[in-house]
Image (cartoon, rainbow, N blue to C red):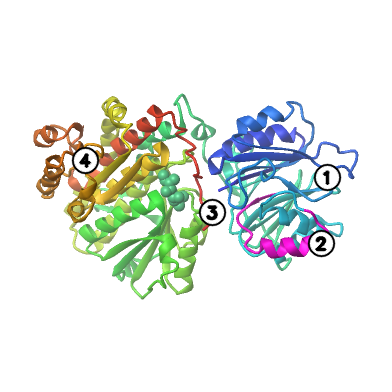
C-alpha cells in the first residue's frame, strides 16, 4: 500500500526513482511523484518536485528526461486521506520547499497536529495526513535531519514508513518506520530506501529490513540505523536471491497471466526438498517446534485476509480431515477485535503473501501478546510477519506482482498440504498412507500443467459469459473455499459481482437470486459429495439458471446438465483444490481481458494492504 523509493549515489536520481516506482506500482497507483535535489550548488533553493495523478507512465511525461540531481525520493500512492489529486500526491514539502517527505501509512492524530502547526503559522497545501510530517520536521529542525525526524515521529500516532530529505543536507536521506515496511538497499557507492525490495532489485541484492521504531540515515557510501532511544543498531545484511526475470513480464501480456502459468514451477518450488518419500512425511525446518510440542497441538487456528484466507480455510478442512485436529480459519480483521481465545495446545498460523498485511500482522501480535504461538506462512522473505512470527514456512512462489493473487495461493496450499501431512503422521496416518500422500503431492505440478491446457476452453467460456452482471460460485467441502476464491478473483479484476457459497447452502437463501441472468459456477468433486452437488445443479436448472461446471474430464452426467463444462485432469479428491482453482483464475483473467479492464492493477486495490 503506497510505494516508497529513495536513492542517493552518483547516478541521475530521477531515472532510478521512476524505474523503482514502476516496479512498485502494484502497491498503489492512483498518483505518483518524485522530489530531487537538482540544485546542489545552492542549499537555499527548494527541491524540484514532479507529481501527478495517474500511473507512472503519466508521471514520466512531465519529468524532463535529463533531470539532474543525484539524491531523491519517490512515491506511488494508494489514497487514504484526501482525494486523488495532483496536490495530494507525494512528495509533500515544507512551506519553503527545503524539506521533502514521502509517507506510507496513516497518521491518526493528523488533525490535532495540523491545528497545532497552523497556529504556529504553517500553511497546508493538501488534504492529506502525510503533509503534517513535512511541516512537523520543519518545526523541530535544528540543523540535523535525523534528530529532527526522531523528534517529529515522537509526535505521531499511527503507522508510517517515511523517507525524507533536507536541502541543507545534500546527499542524505532519512527514513523512519512504524508499521509500514522500509528496506535499505546497500549498493556500491550508492544507497536505496524502499518499501519493498523489488524497487531496487535491478541495482542491489543486499538489503537491510528496518524494524518498527528504527530510524535510518543514508549517504551514498554509508548508512546507520538507530532505535527510538537513539541506540545504534547493528544492521543485518540479507541477500535476496530473486532473479530480475522474476519481476519481468517475460513475453506475457500481464503479470497475472504470467503468474497463473508459472504455477507448475512455483508449486514445485514450494514442495522442493520438503517431501520425504521414505518416511512419508514432510521436512519443514523452520517451525521451531519439537516433535513433542507438535504432538501437543490439539487445535489449529489460521489468521489471514483475502486470498490467503481462502488458502487458510482450505487448510482448516485438511487439518480436520487428515490430521483430525480441530481447525478454523479466521479473517484477521475480525479476529483481532474478537477477544481471541488462546490456550495451551492451540497453534496459530498467520498466512500472508506479502507478509505485511496490517490486519494479519496486528491479529498475529494480539495472539502473541496473549502467549500464543503463531507460525507464519509467507512468501516475501524478511517481511514483517515472517520476522515476527515464532517460526514458519516460506512458500517460495517468487515475487507476485499482479494485485490478484494466483501463484501465491497455490504455493500456500502446497505449504499447508505439507504441514497437514506432518500433523497427520503424528496421529492416525500410517507410513504407507503418508508415502501415498507424498506421491500424490509430487504429481500436483504436472497435473497443474495439464490443467493449464484448458486455457482456450476457458477463454471461449469467458467470452460467452463475461457480460453477465452477477455470478454464484458453488462448491462443497474442500471446494467451498475454492468457490470463494473464484468469486473473489472475478470481482477484483473484472468488477463483476460474484458470490461464493457452500453449494449445500444455496437452498437456504441464495437460490432466490437464480434466474437466466445469474450464472452459477459449480465445482464438482469426484467423491461421495458429487451426487449431492449434481442435485444442487439440477435445482438451479429447474429454476432457469445457467451453469458453468468444473468437474473431472469425461464426467458426462455433469456435462449434460451444464451449459458450459470444463473438464480437469483426474486426481485424488483431497488434492482437487490445486486443479479447480486454475480454471477459476483463468476465467477471471479472460473476463477482465474481454471487458478491457486493467488486469494487473484493478481499480481501488493495492497489492499489499498495510493499513487497517
Ligand atoms: C488477492 O487476490 C487479493 N488481492 C487480496 O485479497 C490479498 O490476498 C489480501 O490482501 C491478503 O494479502 P496477503 O496475502 O499479502 O496478506
Question: Disc 2 vs disc 1: Cβ atoms closer than 8 Å?
Answer: no
Q: Quadrant of residue 72?
A: top right
Q: How far is mark 4 from mark 2, CA to CA?
A: 64 Å
Camera-near label (3 vs 4) is 4
Count neighbours of disc 1 (C-alpha within 10 A) and say few if under 14, some if 14 to 19, many if 20 or more: some
SS category of the residue bearing label 4: loop
Q: How far is mark 3 from mark 4, CA to CA?
A: 39 Å
Q: Earlier in the sequence, mark 4 or mark 2?
A: 2
Q: Tell me where residue 597 appears, x and y as whole percent.
A: 44, 32
Question: Disc 3 vs disc 4: Cβ atoms closer than 8 Å?
Answer: no
Query: Does the stretch in magenta take in 340?
Result: no
Circle on res. 140: 2
Residue on which the image places disc 3: 610
Q: Earlier in the sequence, mark 3 or mark 4?
A: 4
Q: How far is mark 3 from mark 2, CA to CA?
A: 28 Å
Residue on which the image places disc 4: 515
Q: Earlier in the sequence, mark 3 or mark 2?
A: 2
Picture mark count: 4
What is the magenta range? 101-123
SS category of the residue bearing label 2: helix
Amino acid at each position: 500500500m503506497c510505494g516508497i523509493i529513495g536513492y542517493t549515489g552518483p547516478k541521475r536520481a530521477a531515472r532510478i526513482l521512476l524505474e523503482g516506482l514502476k516496479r512498485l506500482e502494484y502497491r498503489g497507483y492512483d498518483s505518483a511523484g518524485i522530489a530531487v535535489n537538482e540544485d546542489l550548488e545552492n542549499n537555499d533553493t527548494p527541491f524540484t518536485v514532479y507529481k501527478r495523478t495517474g500511473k507512472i507512465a503519466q508521471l514520466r511525461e512531465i519529468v524532463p528526461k535529463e533531470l539532474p540531481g543525484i539524491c531523491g525520493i519517490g512515491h506511488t500512492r494508494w489514497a487514504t486521506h484526501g482525494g486523488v489529486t495532483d496536490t495530494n500526491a507525494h512528495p509533500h514539502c515544507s512551506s519553503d520547499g527545503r524539506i521533502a517527505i514521502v509517507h506510507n501509512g496513516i497518521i491518526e492524530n493528523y488533525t490535532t497536529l495540523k491545528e497545532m502547526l497552523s497556529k504556529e503559522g504553517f500553511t497546508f497545501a493538501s488534504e492529506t495526513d502525510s503533509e503534517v510530517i513535512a511541516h512537523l520536521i520543519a518545526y523541530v529542525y535544528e540543523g540535523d535531519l535525523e534528530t529532527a525526524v526522531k523528534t517529529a515521529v515522537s509526535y505521531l500516532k499511527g503507522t508510517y514508513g517515511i523517507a525524507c530529505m533536507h536541502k541543507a543536507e545534500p546527499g542524505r536521506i532519512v527514513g523512519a518506520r512504524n508499521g509500514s515496511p522500509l528496506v535499505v538497499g546497500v549498493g556500491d557507492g550508492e544507497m536505496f530506501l524502499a518499501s519493498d525490495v523489488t524497487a531496487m532489485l535491478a541495482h542491489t541484492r543486499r538489503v537491510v529490513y528496518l524494524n518498527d521504531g528504527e530510524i535510518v540515515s543514508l549517504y551514498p557510501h554509508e548508512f546507520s540505523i538507530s532505535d527510538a532511544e537513539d541506540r545504534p543498531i547493528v544492521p543485518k545484511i540479507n541477500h535476496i536471491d530473486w532473479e530480475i526475470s522474476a519481476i519481468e513480464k517475460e513475453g506475457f501480456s500481464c503479470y497475472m497471466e504470467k503468474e497463473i502459468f508459472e504455477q507448475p514451477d512455483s508449486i514445485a518450488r514450494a514442495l522442493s526438498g520438503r517431501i520425504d518419500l521414505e518416511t512419508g512425511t514432510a521436512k519443514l525446518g523452520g517451525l521451531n517446534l519439537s516433535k513433542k510440542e507438535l504432538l501437543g497441538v490439539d487445535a489449529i487456528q489460521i489468521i489471514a485476509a483475502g486470498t490467503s484466507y481462502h488458502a487458510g480455510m482450505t487448510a482448516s478442512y485438511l487439518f480436520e480431515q487428515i490430521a483430525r485436529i480441530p481447525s478454523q480459519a479466521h479473517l484477521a480483521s475480525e479476529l483481532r477485535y474478537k477477544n481471541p481465545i488462546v490456550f495451551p495446545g492451540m497453534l496459530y498460523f498467520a498466512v500472508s503473501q506479502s507478509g505485511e498485511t496490517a490486519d494479519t500482522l496486528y491479529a498475529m501480535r494480539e495472539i502473541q501478546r496473549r502467549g500464543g504461538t503463531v507460525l507464519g506462512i509467507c512468501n516475501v522473505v524478511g517481511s514483517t510477519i515472517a520476522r515476527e512470527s515464532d517460526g514458519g514456512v516460506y512458500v517460495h512462489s517468487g515475487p507476485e506482482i499482479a494485485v490478484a493473487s494466483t501463484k501465491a495461493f497455490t504455493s500456500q496450499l502446497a505449504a499447508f498440504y505439507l504441514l497437514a501431512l506432518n500433523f497427520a503422521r503424528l496421529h492416525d496416518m500410517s507410513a504407507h498412507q503418508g508415502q501415498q500422500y507424498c506421491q500424490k503431492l509430487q504429481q500436483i505440478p504436472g497435473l497443474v500443467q495439464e490443467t493449464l491446457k484448458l486455457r482456450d476452453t476457458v477463454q471461449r467460456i469467458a467470452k460467452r459469459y463475461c457480460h453477465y452482471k452477477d455470478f454464484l460460485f458453488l462448491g462443497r467441502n474442500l471446494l467451498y473455499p475454492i468457490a470463494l476464491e473464484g468469486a473473489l478473483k472475478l470481482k477484483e479484476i473484472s468488477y463483476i459481482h460474484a458470490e461464493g457459497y457452500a453449494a449445500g447452502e444455496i437452498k437456504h437463501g441464495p437460490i432466490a437470486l437464480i434466474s437466466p441472468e445469474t450464472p452459477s459456477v459449480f465445482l464438482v468433486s469426484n467423491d461421495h459429495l458429487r451426487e449431492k452437488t449434481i442435485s444442487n445443479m439440477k435445482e438451479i436448472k429447474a429454476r432457469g439458471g445457467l451453469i458453468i461446471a468444473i468437474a473431472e474430464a469425461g464426467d458426462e452426467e455433469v456435462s449434460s446438465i451444464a451449459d458450459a463444462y470444463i473438464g480437469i485432469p483426474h486426481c485424488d479428491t483431497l488434492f482437487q483444490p490445486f486443479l479447480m482453482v486454475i480454471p477459476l483464475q483463468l476465467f477471471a483473467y479472460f473476463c477482465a481481458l474481454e471487458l478491457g479492464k486493467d488486469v494487473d492493477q484493478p481499480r481501488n486495490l493495492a497489492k499489499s494492504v498495510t493499513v487497517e
